[in-house]
Image (tube, coloured by chain):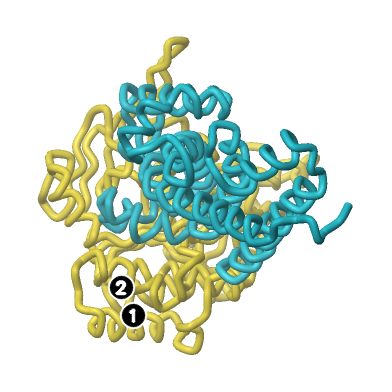
Chain colours: A cyan, B yellow
Amino acid sequence: MNLGNIDWPLIGEATVDTLLMTGFSLLFTVIIGLPLGIVLFLTSPRQMLSNTAIYQLLSFIVNVLRSVPFLILLIVMIPLTRVLAGTSLGVEGAIPPLVASAAPFFARLVENVLRELDPGVSEACRAMGANSRQTVLLALLPEAMTGIVAAVIVTAIALVGYSAMSGVIGGGGLGDLALRFGYQRYQTDVMIVTVVILVIMVQVLQVFGDRLVVRLNRK
Amino acid sequence: MIVLENLRKTYASPERVSHALAGVSLRIERGEIFGIIGRSGAGKSTLIRMLNLLERPTEGRVIIAGRDITAYGEAELRAFRQSVGMVFQHFNLLSSRTVLDNVCFPLRLAGMSRRQQRERAQEVLALVGLSDHADKYPRQLSGGQQQRVGIARALASKPELLLCDEATSALDPETTQSILRLLIDINRRLGLTIVLITHGMDVIRSVCDRVAVIDAGRIVECGDVLDVFLHPRHAVTQSLLSESGVDAEGWREMAQGMEGTMLRLSFRGDTTLQPLLSRVSRELGVDLSILQGSVGRIKDTPYGQLVVAVQGAPEACMRLPGLLKADGVECEELRP
């Protein structure tokens, strides 16, 4: 293995692409998944806005999206991705399927975090005359903050992995590089470098996330 | 102040219908500390939640200060709840907010300005003796202190009614006493009505003016705490009392093989402090042996209850009850 043979600028570009894909996907995942998770929680049985029809419908959609393997979702979504992102290739083309896959996952995590909260907090809010909106915004979300941050980190790490997979259909980034150079051209050294970079990314995310959780935790 | 009319709560499941409350009617006066005692599953928790409609009755009405709150709409009900304080067994504080912000929370819901919120919160924190802890987080406080925060939060919006849901059940005995003293103190200083539920007779004895005993969704006994303690009528009341060390029937074992008349004497108030037994014993020439007794205080009133065996001339024994009654002692003849 000769590190001198590696096209470092190309690696750098791919790393930035992966970061962009993960970052933007994470942003949209949180924007869509957080409200979805809150609605899932609120409409579930014995909760404030309990509504079996809405809960079952959302729960079904979430389960369907989560049960489709990501690689299949990537391919199935190509027409929709073209509409949403203008292209099904590159960084932009990878974001819609990444969000479609990660948002339901994140929503479930949020739902579970909210469900794990002490029901006494909701009861106290009701007893003080809070409406559902106030209960969620002023009490439940702040109480769930550490859990939600932890869920964001877990989702971010999953997105790093999935973004690499999108290289298969021309998604760009480190996965793309590993596939084209490492696999198709037998350049094992490129493969190893991309893997090392991915490992470092995940480590940094986890360590940073754990610190944040410790700082936020008031329990 | 509070009138409960024939409250029923039934939970229907496909297998069976269960009655959490099977027709409860009660009247709670303004300014009193009213205790509801019962074992777990008796329905006390459901009952107290009906006073702010955290649980809705299947049937019956809840009338507070002349208004039927079961007829309220959602918005009216929320406004009403802001005028009722509630304290919980596990405190239910927001762990992500400081003590001060926890107490500000109900005021924020009421739309008070931030400055007013803080002023009022400082006032109630001073009332519960936690001024120095305003900037701490709940987890940095002891259980008793957390409950004081809970009480401060409940008092923040100047309620006329305070509901205590097993407020001392998660606390150790010493802390329990200090929280109970605080409840009596705020009841006197602020004149607010307190309704509390508990499974411990000691709590009732320490703070309550009146008590209702609930069993299987029904009120089986209700009255002044003193009366209920001295003359418990229902089996559930008797067993709750004996668990807290007030055993009405313990004398029976002692009395085996004893001759003479058995009397149960109940004193209350100043009579408790009089040397009555030695006086009647001297006057009538009878011998008294105490088989069982308890002397103490119920809230502020001293009380005593003794079971005595009387031995002496039959004529003297006959005169004894009359003499004691004349001195204000309740006297009841017992059959071993």
- The mark that comes first in sequence, 2 or 1, is 1
If the image is split into quadrants, where does the N terminus of chain B sit? bottom left
Judging from the image, mark 2 belongs to the subunit labelled B
A52 lies above or below A129: above
Residue contact at pointers 2 and 1, CB within 8 angstroms: yes
Query: In the rendered structure, which amino acid carries the disc numbered 1?
Result: Ala
A171 lies above or below B112: above
Query: How many neighbours does mark 1 have within 10 angstroms: few (below 14), some (14-19), or many (20 or more)?
Result: many
Query: How many neighbours does mark 2 have within 10 angstroms: few (below 14), some (14-19), or many (20 or more)?
Result: many
Q: Nearer the viewer, residue B221 or B4?
A: B4
Judging from the image, mark 1 belongs to the subunit labelled B
Residue found farthest to the front: A5
Query: In the rendered structure, which amino acid carries the disc numbered 2?
Result: Ala
Residue found at x 45% / y 52%: A24
In the image, B209: left or right of B30? right
Residue found at x 79% / y 43%: A187
Question: What is the x, y in percent for residue A10?
Answer: 63, 56
Q: Nearer the viewer, residue A216 or B111?
A: A216
Task: Give the numbered dot on residue B156.
Answer: 2
Provide the secondary structure element on which disc 2 rests.
Answer: helix
Residue found at x 20% / y 78%: B113
Residue located beneath label 1 in the image: B121
